[in-house]
């Protein structure tokens, strides 16, 4: 059965568009289950009706014409209850609605199952038979399984189908994709698709201007592949048998002008660039092979993929020398855009970002926020390869991508962009004020940095020091580990720019979602794997070079603080301190001068450290709460997984109570405690953190002025009264509403109601 199921999913998956996918679906299900009818009804969101989209067994003329309201008929009933309906005599059910156009009067038994995707109903899959009998449990289970497996495919096909129509018809309505807000702000621009090298499936369609030149490039690539296959054949002559070497012969034949190559050239002539044409043709051939029953022929699928990759490698080699053409207001779109790729882009040209993967606490989103680039992540159904060069709006407040925006929508968003600028100008007044509440409570507002540009942006906005310097970011922008001298120069710039204010440098925090291109860490479960201090303690040579560079960089400035990430035991702190001590002695010996011992602190990001924070606080000079990771581990929610993004909740009572507990424990040891996770930069959560008694809040530069305003306007007594009220509430959603209400009530609603909070209509 598993085989049959796999085959159906594969066939539906390989259909070129939504209609053929549904046709394949109904015909495969009908023949597998041996029923007389199989039909699929899809919910049309505009008319709020279930439309018969495909059928085998009912009148074909009814397709696209027959529809049922949300509560109408047996189909409506399945949709309403979101569970299967299995009847031996459909007509006797009180909800039965006779549809004369379909010819279904002949069929007595009915089994309908909902097609659900991400808690939403997409449609209903139905089988019918003349026999008056209930479908048995295994038949019902089979249909439920088919429907569950195919819901994602149907959701995707629906979107892509819609988009294809859109591309062909420029006047048609805007297409909206929902994701998760990654970085606030809105942007209007044209898409540049970012794709990983040597990955055929992710190559976007892209129009090419000089078709003859593109064909020339492609032919050169084919010639190079021929040469390399001939070479391979010669090389293998001594070690492979003649039959085994026949594969090379097959490859060369496939490269024949009449076959593959001819088809690709035809697509280039139709306007696609060579890599896009190659992807499309290889995809078609692979699908054709997949549906073949002969196992030998199916094997040929691997060959055609391999050949496709060889051609792609050649094409990409040629392109390497030519950077993509970055226009002003470029919107980067990709399946996934790693931080290391983002920071390599010409950032002054990038207006917005949108990705299929990721969630708002993923590292890339945090960096985008620091850079002030509006970002939407977790847009599951985004047909990335079809979007290149399309005009889009990125709404980073609401987590929406609008493709092909109408004139009104463009105007609406241009107004928002203008309002944003004016609003930011209004906040400038707070820049030079001390971060002090109206009732006299003073705390420090620090900035999180990583890139060079952060420095200028932070000082412009009144940062009183750096609460978190993410030292892995400069590591990501290189092709190898930076040397001690290189690191020293980078750190010196940070330390000098803020001196005499403190700069808290976190030691290398890689692993999890922070990969270095030249030091990949591949693990089943990276969030629980080799990350942060675990990596650097296992590689003391990396740790020592980094600490020595930091110490040298701070000579004469003495504003360095070193912070250890992802600590989960006292032993790790002791080991790290031992190494730092050694590094101080080494630098002193090397430079023949005394080097002041830096203040050393830890990040609390793991529940184990949270519960043992008092023991740990005794060993260090300061503690900083890394709430981004702490929330992920406390709530067991992967911060990168868009599917569970809704459950990642900074207002969760366990999160708030844990953080309050830590502040009290660290203060009981007489040590300062700060917070450098994203909670510190959000006016609502920052109100609660202020009330808890944090000594410092550290955030991305884009939030500095907003939080400064909050502190200057919010009396500590009022924040404390609010905290007392919310700490006994058992629901994160209710807590959030209480805090939002409080800010509105105080006349600080502008801090949370940004100009971009959504156009009323599209
Ligand atoms: C955190 O986990 O809260 C934190 C600040 O570190 P990062 O987001 O870089 O993991
Ligand atoms: Mg962290």
Image: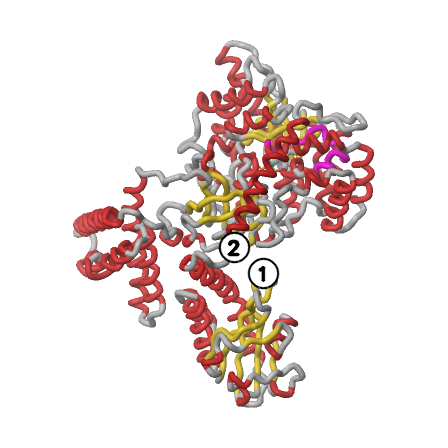
Q: Mark 2 points at which residue?
A: 380
Which of these two is toward me, 403 or 59? 403
Q: Can residue 236 be seen in this view?
A: no
Looking at the image, residue 199 sits to the left or right of residue 347; the answer is left
Which of these two is toward me, 11 or 719? 719
For image coordinates 52% across by 43% down, the residue present is 187
- Residues at circles 2 and 1 in contact by the CB criterion of under 8 Å: yes
Q: How many labels does the image show?
A: 2
Q: In this view, does 365 lie above or below 112?
A: above
For image coordinates 32% across by 57% down, the residue present is 305
Q: Earlier in the sequence, mark 2 or mark 1?
A: 1
Quarter of the image with the C terminus in it = bottom right
**Label ID, residue 118:** 1
State the extent of the magenta-drawn residues as a range: 686-701
For image coordinates 58% across by 68% down, the residue present is 47
Q: Is residue 46 above or below residue 195?
A: below
Residue 248 location (% of width, % of height): 21, 56
Which of these two is toward me, 67 or 738? 67
**Label ID, residue 106:** none
Residue 253 location (% of width, % of height): 19, 59
Looking at the image, residue 152 sits to the left or right of residue 675; the answer is left
SS class, disc 2:
loop
For image coordinates 60% across by 45% down, the residue present is 397
């Amino acid at each position: 059965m598993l085989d049959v199921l796999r085959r159906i999913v594969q066939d539906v998956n390989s259909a070129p568009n939504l209609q053929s996918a549904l046709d394949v679906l109904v015909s495969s299900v009908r023949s597998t289950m041996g029923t007389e009818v199989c039909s699929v009804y899809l919910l049309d969101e505009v008319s709020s009706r279930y439309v018969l989209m495909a059928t085998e067994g009912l009148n074909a003329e009814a397709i696209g014409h027959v529809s049922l309201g949300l509560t109408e008929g047996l189909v409506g009933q399945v949709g309403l209850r979101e569970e299967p309906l299995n009847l031996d005599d459909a007509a006797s059910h009180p909800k039965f609605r006779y549809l004369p156009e379909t010819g279904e009067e002949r069929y007595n038994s009915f089994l309908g199952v909902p097609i659900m995707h991400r808690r939403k109903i997409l449609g209903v899959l139905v089988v019918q038979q003349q026999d008056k009998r209930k479908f048995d449990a295994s038949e019902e289970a089979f249909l439920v399984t088919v429907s569950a497996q195919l819901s994602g495919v149907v959701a995707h096909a629906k979107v892509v189908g819609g988009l294809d129509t859109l591309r062909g018809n420029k006047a048609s309505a805007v297409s909206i994709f929902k994701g998760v807000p990654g970085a606030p702000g809105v942007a209007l621009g044209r898409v540049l698709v970012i794709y990983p090298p040597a990955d055929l499936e992710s190559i976007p369609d892209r129009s090419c201007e000089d078709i003859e030149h593109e064909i020339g490039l492609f032919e050169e690539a084919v010639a190079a592949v021929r040469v390399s296959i001939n070479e391979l054949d010669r090389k293998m002559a001594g070690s492979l048998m003649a039959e085994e070497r026949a594969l090379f012969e097959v490859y060369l034949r496939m490269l024949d002008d009449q076959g593959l190559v001819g088809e690709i050239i035809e697509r280039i002539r139709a306007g696609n660039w060579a890599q896009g044409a190659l992807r499309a043709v290889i995809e078609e051939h692979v699908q054709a092979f997949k549906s073949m029953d002969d196992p030998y022929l199916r094997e040929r699928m691997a060959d055609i993929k391999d050949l496709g990759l060889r051609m792609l490698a050649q094409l990409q080699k040629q392109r390497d020398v030519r950077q993509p053409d970055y226009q002003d207001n470029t919107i980067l779109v990709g399946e996934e855009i790693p931080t290391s790729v983002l920071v390599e882009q010409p950032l002054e040209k990038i207006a917005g970002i949108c990705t299929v993967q990721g969630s708002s606490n993923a590292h890339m989103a945090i960096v985008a926020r620091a850079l002030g680039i509006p970002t939407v992540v977790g847009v599951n159904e985004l047909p990335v390869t079809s979007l290149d060069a399309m005009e889009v709006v990125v709404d980073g407040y609401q987590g929406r991508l609008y493709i092909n925006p109408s004139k009104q929508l463009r105007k609406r968003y241009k107004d928002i962009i203008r309002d944003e600028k004016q609003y930011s100008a209004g906040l400038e007044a707070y820049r030079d004020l001390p971060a002090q509440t109206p009732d006299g409570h003073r705390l420090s507002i620090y900035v999180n940095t990583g890139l060079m540009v952060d420095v200028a942006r932070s000082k412009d906005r009144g940062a009183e020091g750096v609460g978190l310097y993410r030292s892995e970011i400069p590591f990501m922008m290189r092709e190898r580990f930076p040397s001690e001298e290189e690191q020293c120069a980078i750190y010196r710039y940070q330390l000098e720019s803020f001196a005499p204010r403190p700069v808290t440098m976190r030691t290398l925090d890689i692993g999890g979602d922070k990969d270095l291109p030249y030091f990949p860490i591949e693990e089943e479960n990276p969030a629980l794997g080799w990350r942060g201090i675990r990596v650097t303690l296992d590689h003391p040579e990396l740790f020592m070079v980094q600490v020595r560079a930091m110490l040298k960089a701070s000579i004469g400035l003495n504003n360095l603080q070193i912070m250890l990430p992802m600590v989960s035991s006292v032993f790790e702190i002791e080991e790290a301190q031992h190494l730092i001590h050694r590094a101080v002695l080494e630098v002193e010996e090397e430079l023949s001068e005394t080097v002041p011992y830096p203040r050393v602190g830890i990040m609390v990001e793991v529940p184990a450290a949270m519960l043992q924070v008092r023991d740990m606080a005794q060993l260090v000079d300061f503690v900083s709460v890394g709430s981004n990771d702490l929330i992920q581990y406390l709530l067991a929610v992967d911060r990168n997984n868009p599917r569970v993004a809704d459950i990642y909740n900074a207002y969760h009572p366990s999160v708030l109570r844990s953080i309050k507990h830590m502040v009290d424990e660290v203060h009981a040891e007489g040590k300062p405690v700060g917070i450098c996770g994203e909670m510190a930069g959000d006016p609502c959560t920052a109100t609660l953190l202020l009330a808890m008694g944090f000594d410092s809040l550290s955030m991305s530069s884009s939030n500095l002025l907003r939080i400064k305003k909050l502190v200057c306007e919010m009396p500590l007594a009022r924040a404390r009264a609010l905290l007392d009220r919310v700490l006994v509430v058992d629901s994160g959603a209710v807590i959030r509403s209480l805090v939002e209400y409080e800010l509105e009530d105080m006349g600080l609603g502008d801090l949370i109601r940004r100009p971009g909070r959504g156009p009323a209509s599209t």
